[in-house]
Amino acid sequence: MSVSKFQQSIRRLQKKSRLLAVSELGKLAKLDVGREVRKGVPEVILAEGKEPDDVARIVGKVVVHTGRAIVSRASQKHLRAVKLRSGSGLEVEYDPRSRMIVVRSKSYRTNRGGGRVGILTAGTSDIPVAEEARIIAEEMGCKTKSFNDVGVAGLHRLFEPLKDLLRWDADVILVVAGREGALPTVVAGIVDVPVVGVPTSRSYGFGDKGLAALAAMLQSCSLGMSVVNIDGGVGAGAVAAMIANRVGQVRASRSDTRES
């Protein structure tokens, strides 16, 4: 075997080891630190149900391996614990609406995927779930553009934001809605890009806690729409970014071809 082929084999083995890397934190957690390299989606630490100090320890371990850690459903106690354990070399961002924490080393840079994710909410109460999705999409390298409170109770509010997203050439549109969950169906019946319906638990009465919204979206007769779980902002942001970044790569390659 030539030296160059041997070096290529070594690099392939090193890459494979990174893809399948697991970092153990005592008996507390097994962290999939190779997930983003393997599939383009970062590991997200769910804080809900975890002790604040445990979350802070996990964050520290993830940052060591990847340069960044993302925490969802974090309380103020979780935030304080993370800040307490984060040294001067780390930047801690907290979004109070979505309850998301992003911790980065100062040298960390997000890889730009070129995708464009549009986000619409039916009501103001749906914004926290939409913000979860936005942060995940941006941390996966997408550009985002959001418009809020454009639900079917006043359908005329939808048209200008939707035209704006189409002029912007959004690759995917996330539509976040509670109550009867009708807005994603309306949007999917108009646009020629994939729509992800995101039902929220912001509802009461018959079909409360998002059940009616989820059922309505699953029963939608508008083709070209997929649906995530109730309050599934993180999952929605991830799948939207994966789709959008694939489109962004094609767009960039075509641009390079024209320039050459």
Image: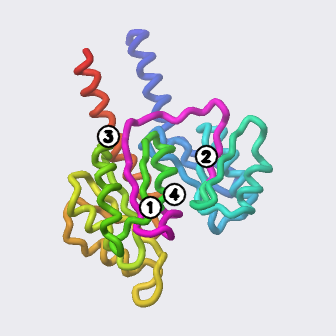
Disc 2/disc 4 C-alpha distance (Å): 15 Å
Q: Is residue 140 above or below residue 219?
A: above
Q: Amino acid at mark 1?
A: Asn
Quadrant of the frame with the C terminus: top left
Label 4 to label 1: alpha-carbon separation: 14 Å
Give the mark nearer the N terminus: 4 vs 1: 4
- Tell me which residue sits at (47%, 31%) in the image: 15
For marks 3 and 4 on the same chain, the one whose residue lies earlier in the sequence? 4
Mark 2 or 1: the one toward you: 1
Estimate the x, y position of residue 60 in percent, counting from the top left. 70, 45
**Membership of 120 in magenta stretch:** yes
- Is 67 situated left or right of 37 in this image? right
Q: Residue at x 32, y 43 (%)?
A: 168
Residue at the disc numbered 4: 132
Q: Is residue 87 left or right of residue 172?
A: right
Give the class, few, some or many, for how many residues have Cα within 10 Å of label 1's Cα (few <14, many ≥20): many
Tell me whether circle 3 and circle 1 mark residues in contact (CB < 8 Å). no
Q: Earlier in the sequence, mark 3 or mark 1?
A: 1
Instruction: Tell me the amino acid under the disc marked 3.
Output: Arg
Q: Residue furthest toward the bottom? A: 206
Question: Which quadrant of the view contains residue 230?
Answer: bottom left
Q: Residues within 10 Å of mark 4 (few under 14, many from 20)?
A: many
> Mark 3 = which residue?
246
Question: 242 or 254, which is in the foreground?
Answer: 254
Residues rendered magenta in the picture: 101-129
- Residue on which disc 1 sits: 148
- Mark nearest the camera among 3 and 4 is 4
At mark 3, the secondary structure is helix
